[in-house]
Image (spheres, rainbow, N blue to C red):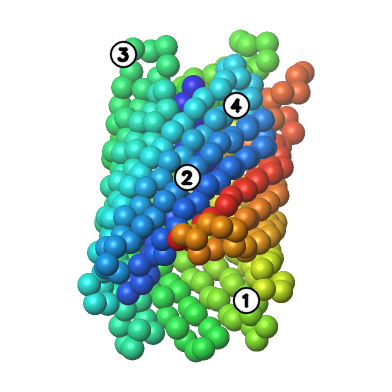
Amino acid sequence: MQLNPATRRLAGVLAAGLLLGPVSSLAGVLPDDRADLMYHYYDGGGVEIDGPSVLVRKKFAEKYAVSASYYVDMVTSASIDVVTTASPYSEERTQYGFGVEYLRGKVTYAASFSNSSENDYESDTASFSISQDMFGDLTTVSLSFSRAWDDVTRRGDSVFSDQIDRRIYAVDISQIASRKLVLGLSWETITEEGFLNNPYRQVRYVDPAEARGYSYDPERYPRTRTGNALAARARYFLPYRAALQGEYRWYNDTWGIDSSTFEVGYTHPIGERWTFDAHLRYYMQDAADFYSDLFPFRNFQNFLARDKELSTMDSLTLGVGISYEFKVPRVEFLDKATVNLKFDRIQFNYDDFRDLRPTGLAPGTEPLYSFDANVIRLFVSGWF
């Protein structure tokens, strides 16, 4: 079965701290020559995701840089969506990418391409960005554009095939406000067109003819979606080489979803080789206009959804990490290396999505669904 959109986003986020493409670099500074090898693991809500990832970056003549990455997700799912309407499944997703950068004066041009593939979903993504330092190198302005072409199929159905066209426009401003304070502001617009729902998921509606009191029908989503996100962030450096950081992100889209994300973090060095960090993140959102856990009757409205990720929900994440820097003996080409371990504990709560596994309850009176998840990332980085 196809990974649902939320699982696919989660799989990508697991490696976000490692597999940073070239568009993430600051203007005027190319990324260091570096190689990263990571193992990631997610376990929560009946879903397990794990696999390796690797990234290599290399620059030439201080003005050119190239990068390449490879990433694998091995997914086993017996989530609430699956066990109530289908059978547990296993899936593998692979992703590879490469990028190039060119530095000219205070301007950095970057382009990248990635391909993600699973047995019933194929996605190609191309990105381009331009960044420039200005005002005495205290301000960096970045503009970026990404476009993805997705092909959606359905296992066991040779006839079904559809596409998604996704575009992301972004503006980012980073400002050094003082020797200790760095501020940032970013705006992102995401447009999507095509088959935007999961071809396997179903909605439920009241059906007195059924002994359980309800029946199922396939979901139906709008074929367009536009979302906008605004994020503000700050990082303050403390006298003893530690740092505090905070971020707020607001999101709104044409499906009626409004969300806010609040995050605070702290980084603390321990001696010359150890670094500890911790962060707390809270996320909340309103439901999509066409979402319902239980519709009054069949074909109640034009668009129908019962994806819990489109419901009214919130999540709380507590994360910690530790890093150790060392020099590999007798390996002259390697300047330094680090081993890093990060752990997140996430609690998800759904305000209008119900757990259908208890039997014998009247439709709409089942307990609300919630679950906890653990995320582990272990990776080794080497600079050469």
Mark 3 and mark 4 in contact? Answer it, CB < 8 Å: no
Q: Position of residue 158 (x, y in %)?
A: 33, 12
Q: Which mark's residue is nearer the viewer, 1 or 2?
A: 2
Q: Residue at x 59, y 81 (%)?
A: 237
| Residue tagged 2 | 54
Q: Amino acid at mark 2?
A: Val
Residue placed farthest to the front in the image? 330
- Is residue 187 visible in the rendered image? The answer is no
Q: Quadrant of the C terminus?
A: bottom left
Q: Residue at x 63, y 32 (%)?
A: 47
| Residue tagged 1 | 243
Q: Residue at x 47, y 45 (%)?
A: 54
Q: Position of residue 121 (x, y in %)?
A: 39, 28
Q: Amino acid at mark 1?
A: Ala
Separation of marks 3 and 4 at Cα, in angstroms? 26 Å
Separation of marks 1 and 3 at Cα, in angstroms? 55 Å
Crowd band around label 2 with a 10 angstrom C-alpha radius: few (<14), some (14–19), many (20+): many
Decide which of tag 2 and tag 3 comes sooner along the chain. 2
Mark 1 and mark 3 in contact? Answer it, CB < 8 Å: no
Of the pair 20 and 316, the residue shown nearer to us: 20
| Residue tagged 3 | 159
Residue 316, located in which quarter of the rendered image?
Answer: bottom right
Of the pair 125 and 54, the residue shown nearer to us: 54
Instruction: Provide the secondary structure element on which disc 2 rests.
Output: strand
Separation of marks 4 and 1 at Cα, in angstroms? 38 Å
| Residue tagged 4 | 76
Q: Position of residue 86 (x, y in %)?
A: 58, 17
